[in-house]
Image (cartoon, rainbow, N blue to C red):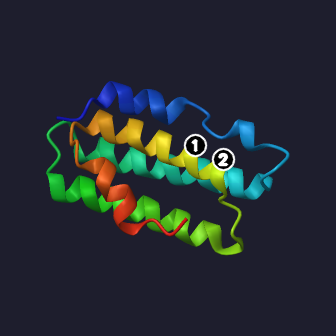
Amino acid sequence: MSDLEALRQFRTDTHFSSWAGTVLTDDIESSEQSIRTLIDDLIALGAKAPKGAVRSAFYACVERFNELNDRGWICTLEREDLCDLLERIADATGFEEAIEWIDDKREW
């Protein structure tokens, strides 16, 4: 069962401000938007979201980051930050296996 309040909190947070100076502003903004889109999708699915729909939302988010990384800017620090955040969002969905869904499609 998804913790919608935790997801809403993730939605209002800024996650990648520490990248300023090393990552292009457009890439930071696109990354923030990709996370907001994931969270919006998860919230729209509701607290009792079906596993397949949650998995699809994570896959879509990871694919967006695959596309954003076309210049190879996601390096160790960014990868760790992204994976940490996606894992915390996965925890909020209540699906333990959601952490594995991140690696299923990740190219960075």
Which circle marks residue 81 in the picture?
1
Residue at horizontal 29 percent and vertical 46 percent from the top: 44
Q: Residues within 10 Å of mark 2 (few under 14, many from 20)?
A: few
Task: Name the quadrant containing residue 91.
Answer: top left
Number of callouts: 2
Q: Place residue 56 in its image quadrant.
A: bottom left
- Give above or below for 36 relative to 17: below
Q: Is residue 88 left or right of residue 21?
A: left
Residue found at the far front of this picture: 76
Q: Residue at x 23, y 35 (%)?
A: 2
Where, by quadrant of the figure, is residue 9 drawn? Answer: top left
Give the image location of residue 15, x and y in percent. Answer: 60, 37
- Residue 65, compared with residue 29, is above or below; it is below
Residue at 55% x, 65% y is 108
* Residue assigned mark 2: 77
Please state which amino acid type lies under the numbered disc 1.
Asp
Above or below, comparing residue 17 to residue 42 in the picture:
above
The CA span between labels 1 and 2 is: 6 Å
Indicate the position of residue 57 as horizontal and vertical percent values.
Answer: 33, 57
The x and y percentages for residue 54 are 25, 53
Task: Please identify the quadrant where the N terminus is shown.
Answer: top left
Q: Is residue 81 left or right of residue 38?
A: right
Amino acid type, label 2 = Leu
Q: Secondary structure at mark 1?
A: helix
Q: Position of residue 24 (x, y in %)?
A: 79, 56
Residue under the point 54% across and 63% down = 65
**Where 25 falls versus 63 (above or below)?**
above
Residue at the right extreme of this rendering: 21
Q: Are marks 1 and 2 in contact (CB under 8 Å)?
A: yes
Horizontally, residue 79 falls left or right of residue 84, namely right
Q: Element under label 2?
A: helix
